[in-house]
Image (cartoon, rainbow, N blue to C red):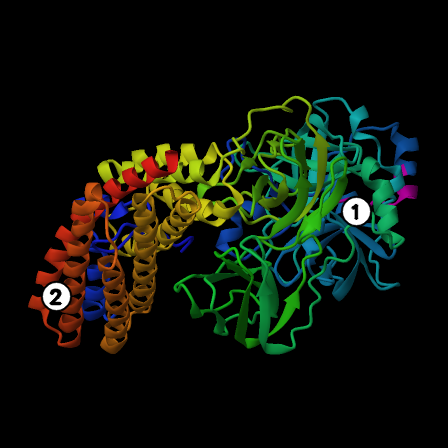
Amino acid sequence: MGRKQSNYAPGFHMTSSLAKALSRDRSFLVTMIAAFAVLVVACGGGSDGPEPPTALGTDRQVETQDARDDAPPPTSTTSDADERRADADEDARAPLTPDEVFDRLARAIAFVESPAFTGSAILFDERHLLTNAHVVFPFESVRVVFADGTEIQSAQVVGIDLLADLAVIEIPSGVVPTPPFDLAESPDAAELPIGTELFLIGYPAETEALPKPSITRGILSRVREWDALDIAFIQTDAAIAGGQSGGALVSQFGEIIGISGFSFGGENFALAASIADSLERVQALVGGEDVAGLGPRFLNVQPSATEINGFLADTFDRAEFVFQGSAGLSTRVSVGSDSDVQFFVTGVDGDFPLLVDDLFSGVETGRFTPINSVPYIIVVEQFVDAAARFQISSNSPLGRFRDPDARRTLSIGEALAANLDYPGDRDVFRIDLERGEAIVIDIDTINFDPIVTVDALTNPAICGPLSIDDDSGGGLFGLNASVHFVAPTTDRYIVSVEDVALIDIGGYLLTVTSDSTIAGASLPRNDLSIAEYLTILLRIDAQIARDDNLPLVADDAVAALTSVVPPREATVLHKSLLGSLCAISSGIDLTDPVVALLLTFDFSVSGAELLRLAASAMRERVDSPGDAYLAAATSFFADGGAAVASSLLALGNLTTVGTDERAEAVLAIDGLITALEDVVTRLRALSPPADVAGLHQRRLDLLVRTIAVERALRDGIAGSDVTLLLSATLEAQNLTDQGALFAAEWDDLLIDALSE
């Protein structure tokens, strides 16, 4: 559900004084609505740039994978060197007809099938095939079929380059049905004139057990250079379709010049990586080298347990688990925690069957039926900044997946290779920066449309990250990301990288450099005393209490809070308030009772903390009996706010899980009544100065009436008395309006006292 937000209960000063604004809509009757629900119900970027390229080579059998399936047709090459030399001598490089190209090369273009995808591959020696990495990843063996029907049920993937999207498949000796193509004889595509006729040979959209290759024709439209790996990509308008990734792009002389891998469906053109430029990397893969520097990336986790204990360090942390899905077999996943967690399930084939976030705490469960028999990844996250423990269980054996890129530390001047390992993966890095330090973070890849964000644990994600970028980095497709960032404080920052569409995977290059162009940019003020900072918060609180236009006030409040750095004592409060205010300014539906309940809880907690800090600051500078009274009374109000928050949490959990346990609701309200009675007793023991005696008595009256309303609610719930509940709800509405006005006046008193 995202971050949980809330307001405050009747008659109580809670920060932001949101109750009055909410009550004007008569949409949320604070604690009363929550309690009444127990009886009645029984209870964060899109890409602005061009459409991203689609990795071609796979006929994924999942509707959610369409974008990845529209791949350009790969060209196939199969004529042996002797035959081609003889033809050259005989005909002095005469162009071949399409049927001659097909006859010469199609036999060396193989069909490739994994449990999730299909594609094409080029036979380049008697033991090896070249294809795209996205055709085979994350599987270690695939099925191979040649044009003459020769079939290899389990061919090993012996080398994979996730940066350049290349992979090498090894086949048994003695089974090659045709002479291989010698990659060393591939011409440099840059030397071919624009307009040269080209052909794509591969296996588009194949469903047959023993498919036949196909050929399409186009021209060489242009050559694009990928500077990062010094590889040229040949653009052609030859007709393309999913399943052609890994196939051959062939010249009119029967030469394989490229391996097809990307399609642009809207523009109807394909890109193929130059064989001549890729040759050195391919040879290294055959020799067993890790050319991308990514290490082993296959999801070869062996599931072994149906129940595993897990740990999350903070709100940016993830825990990932792998299990083998079985097509058509119902799968159950449960995650239990005292923290507010969510989990989602994603298949390596792009299936995204589950996203579960129903509770603030407890056990959350989801069920789904896999489409294909492929590995699935369960990702557990949380919405709380503190460390949290959880337990995950499933009716399928689970294995723990540890992302090699998770929590890596970055340094200025560093360049590294990383990889998105599954659809929906998000790589999170750390970097330590000094206040005012300026950096540029660049992401370069051909495999997906990257989005990069910079954030900090002290910044609530609901406000959006501190910095974000999608397409400013240029690159081969104009989709690379580049972030320019100035650190507002000395801190450890979070850098995250993911695919905009949460579908595509693959390797990328990340670099961090100093940015002299924005050094010295304006920074939030960081020299505030606690009294000055609390005065800012109290002004925001009073303004919200007096203004009907809550989203507009929230916008102003967010601007005010982000322009300052909170003192150390108020860091947690700052983040909590900023998160709640960002949620309001972003346009959440305040007329939704559940949303209002969430806001009530958050603001109750924040309000209690604000009042405690204010009372503490005033006790340190008491100059008169009036100051002493304000400090004591403010402290008592904070205790009342904590009681409201506790009651709302209990009632909120009841409404969320949909239970009709009246006894639990009665206990929650009884706890609130006891706490409020204690506040009344302590307030009556105070002797207010003459100038605030009237305000003091108003607070006592509001508290006494609030206790009476809570008792009526309790009795109405216990006895299922709808009439009593409705009358108590109407009185609560009145108390809420009066409580908001009182809160604004009390804020003014505190501001004056702290400003002296």
Mark 2 vs mark 1, CA separation in Å: 67 Å
Q: Could you tell me which secondary element the residue under label 1 belongs to?
A: loop
Can residue 530 be seen here? yes
Residue corresponding to mark 2: 725
Residue 585: x %, y % from top left: 35, 38
* Residue 78 is a magenta residue: yes
- Residue drawn at 65 percent across, 77 percent down: 304
Can residue 354 be seen here? no
Please identify the quarter of the rendering in which residue 605 is found: bottom left
- Judged left or right of residue 552, residue 20 is left
Q: At label 2, which amino acid type do we have?
A: Leu
Residue corresponding to mark 1: 292
Q: At label 1, which amino acid type do we have?
A: Ala
Residue 551: x %, y % from top left: 30, 37
- Judged left or right of residue 450, residue 10 is left
Q: Is residue 29 above or below residue 508?
A: below
- Residue drawn at 52 percent across, 40 percent down: 465
